[in-house]
Amino acid sequence: MVKGYIDNNREAILNDLAVLVSHNSVNSDDMLPFGKENRAVLNDALAIFDKIGLKTKDLDGYCGYGEVGEGDKVIGILAHLDIVPAGDGWDTDPFKMTIKDDKIYGRGVSDDKGAVIASAYALKYLIDTGYKFKNRVRLIVGCNEETGSKCIAHYVEKEGSIDMGFTPDANFPGIYAEKGMVSGYIEAKSDKILAIKGGTVSNVVCKEVNAKVTNDLDIEALKRYFDRYDLEYMIEYNDDHYDITLKGVAAHASTPDLGVNAINHLFSGLYEAGLEDELVSYIHDYIGLDNHGKMIGCEALYDEHSDLTLNLGVIDKVDDTIKISVDIRFPVTRTTAEVVKVLDKGLDKEHIHFVKKSLVEPLFFDKELPMIKALKRAYTKVTGDEKTEMEAIGGGTYAKAMANCIAFGCEFSGEDNHIHDANECLAIDSLYKQIMIYIEAIKELDEVCHG
């Protein structure tokens, strides 16, 4: 019955997703609070919610929601409309949704606009089939998840917290723990690196870096280094300096081993080529090619759930100062104070400084909580999968910004949807399966919350 309903609504589902994907909704300052494109995509999302029968509310452009049901308690589904920059390397237009080989391509189809539409059509199914809601259910969509979750902070300020719910912005069958985060930047000066620029955002592994360096290095040794790691590069000699372009592979900062960091490799190559520079030596000695902070003692912070990750995402030289963004995800049994103590000792040196910008404590749920067990039941009922376990992850979701909320979906085990990379995609069958799981999840939570 559910599959037939989804098939009958296929055109509407895909058309509505295409509308959301058409917006390049990267946070910007061309309109408060998060830019013109985020204002526009929020308008379109609320129009979709209204069309399918939800009562809508716009919370000052920070976020909005569609609601169904009645009562004092609120079940929340929190998804986001903002995206990371598309970058290059796409085989299709990232803002014109494309279907080929039963997959949907476009920026945001998996993270997280596809989940917005899947959640909306789960509610539409329940409304259209006459389901009697025992509580209010709100599909809350924000516009600032990728760069701070101020949208959900604004929601909590205006509307309070939910009673229980989930954010479909991670993996099935759910995330019982999310690592803590420390973000900041390394600040240094360099006479040998004349100019440098690379990366898009701090929570993505740097895919490309361009640098202008003085000529007092062994350029053949640099080439040998790049060739040894099978890296794509271009080097040009111009008078008294070299122009270097080095390409890596993007990945989410929480899983840096899935990428190839152009910043790390550039500095490692420059060190091997004999460029005598304090920043080059610093990166070699304290970070190198390791993505887990082992060279500065972070192994002592690992726990039974996970290790620590350290990603260099964006580098730039303005005037005579180089800044390199640092994104750190640390194990759930540790605190920001413990991590900062190790980082300050390991990264902050006499002439090169680690400047902290944001500290976020970890999130941890007992897997025996009724809400958690209800969501796991919904997943198992649809998939029949009783073996896949809930995870502890390095990514941060809205669950850290909203009480009584856990990450649940939207990616299935074994999928690679190229989130935060070129050619982001989502199998149509996976989108359908999301809808079916969210239908069951809403019903399960409605019972638990009512009881």
Image (cartoon, helix red, strand yellow):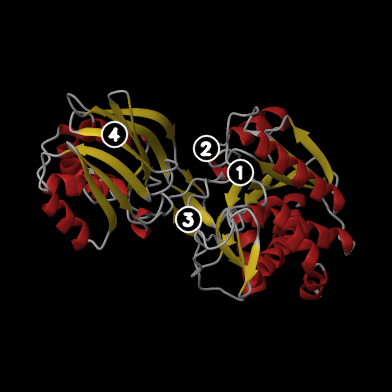
Q: Which residue is mark 2?
A: 147
Mark 1 → mark 2, Cα distance in angstroms: 9 Å
Q: Give yes or no for contact between labels 1 and 2 (Cβ–Cβ under 8 Å).
A: yes
Which of the 4 quarters of the picture holds residue 188?
Answer: top left
- To which residue does mark 3 refer? 421
Residue found 36% across the figure and 53% down from its top: 256
Q: Which sits earlier in the primary sequence, circle 2 or circle 3?
A: 2
| Foreground label between 4 and 3 | 4
Q: Position of residue 196 (x, y in %)?
A: 30, 37
For label 1, the residue is 82
In terms of sequence position, does the residue under pointer 4 or pointer 1 come before the other? Answer: 1
Kindly state the secondary structure of the residue where label 2 is placed: loop
Q: Secondary structure at mark 3?
A: loop
Labels 4, 1: front one: 4
x and y percentages locating residue 113 in the rendered image: 65, 53
Q: Position of residue 416 (x, y in %)?
A: 49, 65
Q: Is residue 239 visible?
A: yes
- The amino acid type found where label 4 is placed reads Ala
Q: Amino acid at mark 2?
A: Thr
Q: Residue at x 65, y 27 (%)?
A: 32
C-alpha span from label 4 to label 3: 26 Å
